Image: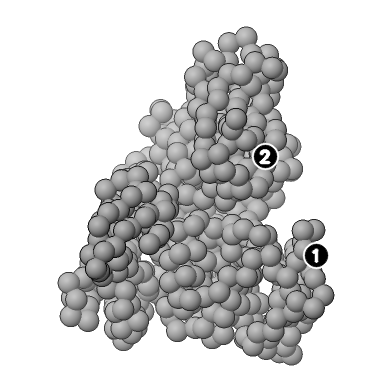
Amino acid sequence: MKTVELVIVGAGAAGLSSAAAAMNAGVKDILVLEKENETGGILNQCIHTGFGLHTFYEELSGPEYAERCAQLLNNTNVVIQCSTMVLSVTQDKILTCSSAEHGLEKIQAKAIIFATGCRERSRGAIQTPGSRCAGILTAGTAQRYLNLDGWLCGRRVLILGSGDIGLIMARRMTLEGAKVVAVAELMPYSNGLPRNIKQCLDEFDIPLYLSHTITQIEGKDRVSGVVLSKVDENLQPIQGTELHFDVDTVLLSVGLIPENSLLEEAGVQLHPKTRGPVVDERCMTNVDGVFVCGNSLHVHDLVDFVYAEGQRCGQGAAAYLKENASSDKHIDVLGFGNVSYVLPQKLHFCDAKLFFRVKTPMKDCAVIVKSGNKELRKIRKLSLIPSIMEEISLKKELLEGCGKELVVEVKEWN
Amino acid sequence: MELTCITCPKGCVLSVKLKDGQIESISGNSCVRGIEYAKNEVLHPVRMLTSTVRIHHASIARCPVKSSKPIPKEKIFDVMKAIEAIEIEAPVQCRDVVIEHVCGLDADIIATRTFQKES
C-alpha cells in the first residue's frame, strides 16, 4: 500500500486552491483524486459570469475561474488523478479508491483534505405530491445537460425555489428558447442574490410567487401541469389558493447539502445546522489530520470565499504535517439570536475570521461577539439576509482570557 | 427611479433622478462602476451574454462562450440565434474569438474554456 503525505479528495475550486496553498507552504507529496474526467468541479457547468471579483479582480465565467485554479498546479509536483472515485476512508486515514486506469487502490495518507462539494436536494426530500413522470429534474441537473451535453430538457418550465441556481436556470432556459412560466418560492422572501432576481426574472418578465409551493404534479409519462398553492405562516398550503400552470418540465432548486458520505465512516463529527463537519479555524475536524473545505464544509454563495477557505485549509494541513500539531485547548464558538450557524465551531488562540448566516432577513442589526457577558467586538450591519454569508474578524488579542466559549449574536441595533 | 445594480454581487440600490429624459443625479452606489451602470441602464441598457456553442472533437459537446463586452439588451435574442447557427472544432483556446462583431455589433463572442483535440 502506498503512502502519500497529503491526499485531497476533489479537484474543484476548494480542492485545487487547497492543493496550491499546501504546496506553497512546503508540502512536497500531494495527490488530488477527482471522480470526473476533468478538474473544475461545478464551475465547468456554471457558464455565467460573476466569479473571481475577489480572487482575481476580474469578473470571470465559471470555466474561466476553473482554468485559473488548474493553472496554479501546472508544472508542479502535485499529482492530479482524474476519473478516480474514493469509495471509503478509515479513521486511520486509509483511502480506498477505484479507477479504470489503476483499478482498486488503497492509499495511506498522513493528512487528508475533503473537498467533495455538495448535492442538490431532491423531490423525494421535499415530498412533492403527484405523478412521478419524466420531466422533473433538479436545476443543477438541467444545467449540466444544457451546458455540457447540449440538451434543452423542456419547453415550458416551472421552477420551484428562488435560490441562485433556479434563478440562473430561469434565465438560461429562456435564452435558449424555453418559456419559464413562473418561479415559486416557499418562503416569503427570495433565497437568491437580489441582483439575480433582477437580471434573471424581472428582465424576462418571469413572475415570482413568494410563499407558494407545488402541491400537485400532473402527467402520465411526462409532466403536463403543476398546481401551486399559497402557504401560511406555518408553511402549510392554504385551501382555495390553487393556481394551475400548463408545463412539461419542473425544475427543483430547493437547497444544497454538503456531500459528506465518506466522513462519517472516518469518524468525523458532523454539525446538524451546516450538515458539514465541526471544524476549527484551519478547517481541521475532530479527527487529527482530516480537513474539510469548500461546499462540503458549508454551502457557499461565492466561489471566491471557497477559494479563500481552500487556502486556509491547505495552509492548515501543511502546518499539521510539519508540526503534527493536535487540537487540544480550544474555544467553542456558538451562534445566538438570529444566527443560523457560525464557522469555525472551534477556535484556537490566533487571529480568526468567523463566518455566519442569519436565520431570517433583518435590517439595522448588531453583530456581537462575546464571551460570557463581556463584549469582545460589536459591528453594525444595515441588512443581513440568509442567502449571503457574512464575516466578522477577531484579532487574537481580543481572545485573551476569554474563557471556553464565544458567542456570536445578531439582534437589533439600539 | 430606483434600480438594482447588477455589476457585482453587492447589488446596490441606485436612485436616478431624470429630467426631460436626461440624467440629473445618481446616488446609492458604492463604486464608480455603479454610476456607469446607471447611465447605461437608463439611456441604453446593455447586458453581458453567456451561452454555449456546439463543438466537435472535444471532451464535451458544448464550448462555453461569452460576449467580449456587454451588448444592447434588445439584441440579446438575435445574438443567441447567431451563436446557435455556428459550430466550431477543437482545439480551442480560452479567449479565442468565435464570432467577430456578432450581429454587426462592437462585441465579439469569445470562448471561455480551452479544449484539446480528442480523437
Name the quarter where the N terminus of chain A is drawn: top right
Q: Position of residue A7 (x, y in %)?
A: 54, 40
From the viewer's perspective, is residue A253 above or below residue A151?
A: above
Q: Which residue is mark 1?
A: A236
Helix, strand or loop at mark 1: loop
N-terminal of the pair, mark 1 or mark 2, is 1
Q: Which kind of residue does numbered mark 1 sit on?
A: Gln
Label 1 resides on the chain identified as: A
Label 2 resides on the chain identified as: A
Among the 4 quarters of the image, the one containing residue A160: bottom right
Q: Please state which of residues A138 and A41 is positioned toward the viewer in this rendering.
A: A138
Q: Residue furthest front?
A: B20
Q: Which kind of residue does numbered mark 2 sit on?
A: Asn
Helix, strand or loop at mark 2: loop
> How far separated are the C-alphas under marks 1 and 2?
23 Å
Q: Position of residue A215 (x, y in %)?
A: 76, 75
Q: How is the image coloured?
A: one colour
Q: Residue A338's mark?
A: 2
Name the quarter where the C terminus of chain A is drawn: top right
Q: Position of residue A334 (x, y in %)?
A: 69, 30
Residue in view at x 55 percent, y 25 percent: A378
State left or right for residue A233 relative to residue A62: right
